[in-house]
Image: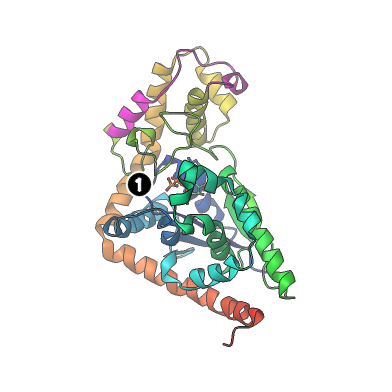
Amino acid sequence: MTKRVFSGAQPSGDMHLGNYLGAFRNWVRLQDDYECIYCVVDMHAITVWQDPAILVQQTREAAAAYIASGVDPKKSILFNQSRVPGHAELAWIFNCVARLGWLNRMTQFKDKAGKNRERVSTGLYVYPNLMAADILLYKATHVPVGEDQKQHLELTRDIAQKFNTDFGVELFPITEPIIMGEGARIMSLRDGTKKMSKSDPSDMSRLNLNDDTDTLAQKIRKAKTDGDLLPAKASLLEGRPEAQNLVGIYAALMDQSRDTVCAEFEGKGFGDFKKALTEVVVTKLAPITEEMKRLQADTAYIDSILKDGAARAQAIAAPILMDVKKAVGYLV
Ligand code: AQP
């Protein structure tokens, strides 16, 4: 069986360092060993309100961020989700396969809906079924996952299994997670217990891939920390979430362990550490920011990449979706 990876990000705001370290950078590394499909998941994005004119821009920005991070659109398939109708078609079938109790257990829905549960879109609730459809529409064998997506991949596996059993077929693979290491979860610069997120109302909470050097420096300078010094070992950062996060970012960008970073900066205060961190962040992100800017200025190029990617994705999806429809008993 083809070893195939599927992954995506929502064009729901500015792409940030969390997306880069938790996703894009890993996607680049997977390109040599897997057939990779990287999607800009615009259908997921609209589960919360998106201004249509901005959504179009953000979709292009997301594609530019993937490419600028090193995703090669010739090697990998890069497209926006809504262009391949199979995602919606399969998601509907999965709405009828997944059980209500399974969705009720999804912690991300609880987090995102919060106290507002009665007022969120029904799309937000069935979001994990659409994610299962994204993956299984291509019979993806592997999905790179961070902590926060583990539960959704479990659901995808449950749906695949139930579909195969209910319809007496061996159609879907049981997709394996690829667990990513250091830097898997980057936290907000304003609150080390919350993840860095596009939808955080404070722009100061995240380092955006399109921030200029001065903005990055200012955000790091203003990042919340405590008054203590850096300890000799990472385990001694326990209970200091902001300090832990900044050390984690440095370690991830330098491809070092947190212990190595602590050993280097032991006894220093966060004033000094932030200066070193700024240098590392700027060195690593500036080339990406510049390339994103260049790509975004060429909308025709980005649009042609996404259109071509959608045609390649469609070619893989069409026969799989046909088998699904036949298994379900649709008259085709
Ligand atoms: N803070 C993070 N640390 C590590 N990885 C992260 N990812 C997102 N935030 C972090 C990873 O980026 C990929 C794409 O994420 P997404 O856009 O599909 O959705 P998300 O995880 O919900 O990202 P945001 O920024 O928090 O978006 P909003 O605010 O719109 O919900 C995923 O692989 C994710 O793990």
In the displayed structure, does residue 79 sit left or right of residue 328? Answer: left
In the displayed structure, does residue 211 sit left or right of residue 281? Answer: left
Q: What is the residue that sits farthest to the front in this orientation?
A: 118
Give how far across and how far down residue 308 sits, in percent: 40, 71
Give how far across and how far down residue 40 sits, in percent: 43, 59
Q: What is the residue that sits farthest to the bottom in this orientation?
A: 331
As displayed, is residue 186 above or below residue 290? above
Residue drawn 38% across the image and 70% down it: 307
Q: Is residue 224 magenta?
A: yes
Task: Please tell me which residue lies in front, 91 or 266.
Answer: 91
Q: Would you say the beta carbon of the disc 1 residue lies within 8 angstroms of ligand 1?
A: no
Residue drawn 59% across the image and 76% down it: 320
Say which residue label 1 marks: 14
Which amino acid does the dot numbered 1 rest on?
Asp
As displayed, is residue 121 above or below residue 332? above
Task: Please tell me which residue lies in front, 260 or 145.
Answer: 145
Residue drawn 36% across the image and 54% down it: 49
Task: Work out which quarter of the rendered image holds the C terminus and state it.
Answer: bottom right
How packed mark 1 is, by other alpha carbons closer than 10 Å (few <14, some 14-19, many 20 or more), is many
Tell me the magenta residue range.
Answer: 215-240
As displayed, is residue 227 above or below residue 141? above
As displayed, is residue 171 above or below residue 182? below
Give how far across and how far down residue 165 sits, in percent: 74, 70
Residue drawn 58% across the image and 71% down it: 93
Task: Work out which quarter of the rendered image holds the N terminus and state it.
Answer: bottom right
Secondary structure at badge 1 equals: loop
In the displayed structure, does residue 146 sit left or right of residue 58? Answer: right
